[in-house]
Amino acid sequence: MKTETIKDFILRHFRHFNAASLVDAAEGYRKLMSSDGRMLMAIAGAMSTAEIGLSLAEMIRRDKVHAISCTGANLEEDIFNLVAHEHYVRIPHYRDLAPSDERKLLERQLNRVTDTCIPEEEAMRHIEHVILEAWMEADRTGDRFFPHEFFYRLLREGKFEPYQIDPADSWLLAACEKNLPVFVPGWEDSTLGNIYASHCLKGDILNVNTVRGGIEYMMSLAQWYQDASKDHPVGFFQIGGGIAGDFPICVVPMLRQDMGLKDTKLWSYFCQISDSTTSYGSYSGAVPNEKITWEKIAMDTPSYIIESDATIVAPLVFAYVMDSK
């Protein structure tokens, strides 16, 4: 008897509504890869704490993802999980917590993200001690690096070892091994971004721009997109909403309209996984067609929206793509 693959299961059972949208989006992803396409993955929400690396890392290793845009939280929380997983605390009945219960978690230095608590000392302060040395060294020498570049350097030097999970399940480690382009708009809005600001205020870091920021990230993204789209169709796969998606998708109208580079190709594929319903003024809930008016995608761009929980949907899409020839 033939063993049923995840793709076989999905094709047999996922036939209608959001399930059918998942199949359509996954098949569109597969077709983009089969036409030698490139994919930018935008990651919002708490996907790293949800351990998206279990599936995303393998997608990166198999060359199914070619660039990542993510929030500062997703960048650092993959590392937090890598070094402190054994100290995480799961709260399965988080919906029943009273304010007094939340206060007790604070007293235990446990920072809650839905059903999972990140340990302050073992994760955040541990990483702070390691990365602060790198920040201060760069500050002394006058070097400047992007947030992800600091992580890449420290990972390559083994500064975060020993790991508490299988390193194969860290998406940032997989990205580092591939030297994948990573763009982190709004990095300041993260735990380490706040910590960096505090060390600038205390005078430990004299040049605030030692960590490069958003405008330079956009310039770097523009160069990547121009290079990638020269000979390949480039797709956009968005998990969640907010700046992680809005920032990178805008590179196309920036190049076409603000730079006057009218030959710049539009995005060749678009998919968003979101549980934000369509509403007035909600970018996260905007249907893909709205992006036509902003000159991000074309009328015939394969576009999909899966209104569901990304922690359930994304691994299934990834499994489908990796199971395809």
Image (cartoon, rainbow, N blue to C red):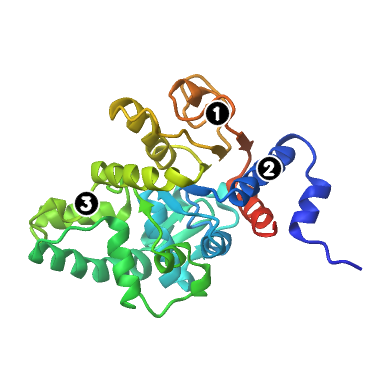
Residue that mark 1 sits on: 288
**In this view, 125 is above or below 40:** below
**What is the x, y in percent for residue 70?**
41, 49
Alpha carbon distance from label 1 to label 3: 31 Å
Q: Does residue 323 appear left or right of residue 289 in this picture?
A: right
SS for callout 1 = loop
- Residue 239 visible within the image: no
Q: Secondary structure at mark 2?
A: helix
Q: Please, what secondary structure does the residue beneath circle 3 have?
A: loop
x and y, in percent, of residue 283 in the image: 46, 28
Q: Residues within 10 Å of mark 3 (few under 14, many from 20)?
A: some
Q: Is residue 188 above or below residue 51?
A: above
Q: Residue at x 47, y 50 (%)?
A: 46
Q: Which residue is mark 3?
A: 212
Q: Residue furthest bottom?
A: 162
Residue that badge 2 annotates: 22
Q: Quadrant of the C terminus?
A: bottom right
